[in-house]
């Protein structure tokens, strides 16, 4: 099982690791990684791996997770001299992309929490992007005019400069402590025994495996840019970050 270094340190930009498995010369599993694999509505990190023995560089195009292994898909330019099991490498995260996702993800927790509390909605999904992100929710009465108010509440919370803490607890403790298992309508999958908690001081405590900023002031602010009615009580909201 790959050690996920991003779990408790989202600001780690570089790391050292050993190649544990190579598939089709393109899919690399390391013993440890700071690359975030696509999951929970957050896109994967990109960057590069550099072999320590000769400095050969391999661009990381996509990262995924399966059965505890985090797989890094690299480009095929150096296949003839590709990575091998046992190679020592240094990983470099595409930081601009990662940091944008960190700001987006923490912002998503805040605006989703506001929609839950103020509108009585149930969050059903989300998708983070670099330019815009979306939150899906279930709500019978869809008062679009109210969302300007929700945006202001979210931005007021962001402006509080609240600390964002990440920590691990047992599944049992998470189920006992949290009023809901996650921000989504579904709960934990069966294989999860340890839960990563994201606590935005004074705002929300949730189970989440994504990457987040250390303080809400790093988000700067959000702007709601589109609202959609997806049928019945299914609604969708798009927002972007204020730079």
Image (tube, grey):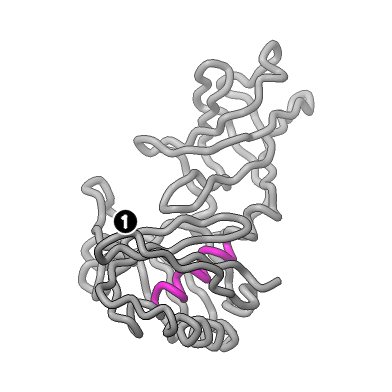
Task: Tell me which residue sits at (25%, 55%) in the image.
Answer: 188
Q: Which residues are magenta?
A: 102-113
**Residue 105 appears left or right of 17:** left
Residue to which mark 1 is pinned: 194
What is the number of callouts on the image?
Answer: 1
Q: Quadrant of residue 215?
A: bottom right
The one nearer the camera, 237 or 179, is 237
Crowding around mark 1 (Cα neighbors within 10 Å: few <14, some 14 to 19, many 20+) is: few
Q: In terms of secondary structure, what is the magenta stretch mainly?
A: helix
The one nearer the camera, 152 or 88, is 152
Residue at the extreme top of the image, as rendered: 80
**Would residue 168 be visible to someone looking at this image?**
no
| Magenta residue check for 116 | no
Task: Tell me which residue sits at (41%, 80%) in the image.
Answer: 114
Pinpoint residue 76: horizontal percent, then vertical percent.
Answer: 66, 20
The image shows residue 221, relative to residue 71, as above or below, that is below
Quarter of the picture containing the N terminus is: top left
Task: Tell me which residue sits at (52%, 59%) in the image.
Answer: 211
**Residue 117 appears left or right of 58:** left
Task: Tell me which residue sits at (51%, 36%) in the image.
Answer: 31
The one nearer the camera, 51 or 108, is 108
Pinpoint residue 226: horizontal percent, then vertical percent.
Answer: 51, 67
Pinpoint residue 177: horizontal percent, then vertical percent.
Answer: 26, 74
Pinpoint residue 93: horizontal percent, then vertical percent.
Answer: 67, 47
The image shows residue 86, relative to residue 220, as above or below, that is above
């Amino acid at each position: 099982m790959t050690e996920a270094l991003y779990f408790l340190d989202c600001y780690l930009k570089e790391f050292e690791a050993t190649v544990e498995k190579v598939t089709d010369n393109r899919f690399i599993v390391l013993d440890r990684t700071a690359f975030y694999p696509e999951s929970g509505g957050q896109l994967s990190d990109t960057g590069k791996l550099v072999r320590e023995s000769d400095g050969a560089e391999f661009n990381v195009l996509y990262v995924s997770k399966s059965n505890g292994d985090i797989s890094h898909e690299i480009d095929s330019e150096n296949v003839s001299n590709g990575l091998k099991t046992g190679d020592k490498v240094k990983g470099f995260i595409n930081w601009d992309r990662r940091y944008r996702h960190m700001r987006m993800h923490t912002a998503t927790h805040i605006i989703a929490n506001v929609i839950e509390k103020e509108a009585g909605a149930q969050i059903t999904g989300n998708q983070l992007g670099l330019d815009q992100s979306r939150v899906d929710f279930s709500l019978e009465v869809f008062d679009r005019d109210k969302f300007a108010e929700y945006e202001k509440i979210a931005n007021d919370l962001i402006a509080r400069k609240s600390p964002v803490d990440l920590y691990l607890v047992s599944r049992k403790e998470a189920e006992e402590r949290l009023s809901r298992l996650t921000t989504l309508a579904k709960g934990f999958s069966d294989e999860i025994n340890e839960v990563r908690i994201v606590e935005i001081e004074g705002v929300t405590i949730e189970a989440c495996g994504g990457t987040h900023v250390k303080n809400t002031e790093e988000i700067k602010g959000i702007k709601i840019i589109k609202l959609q009615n997806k049928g019945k009580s299914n609604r969708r909201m798009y927002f972007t970050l204020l730079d």
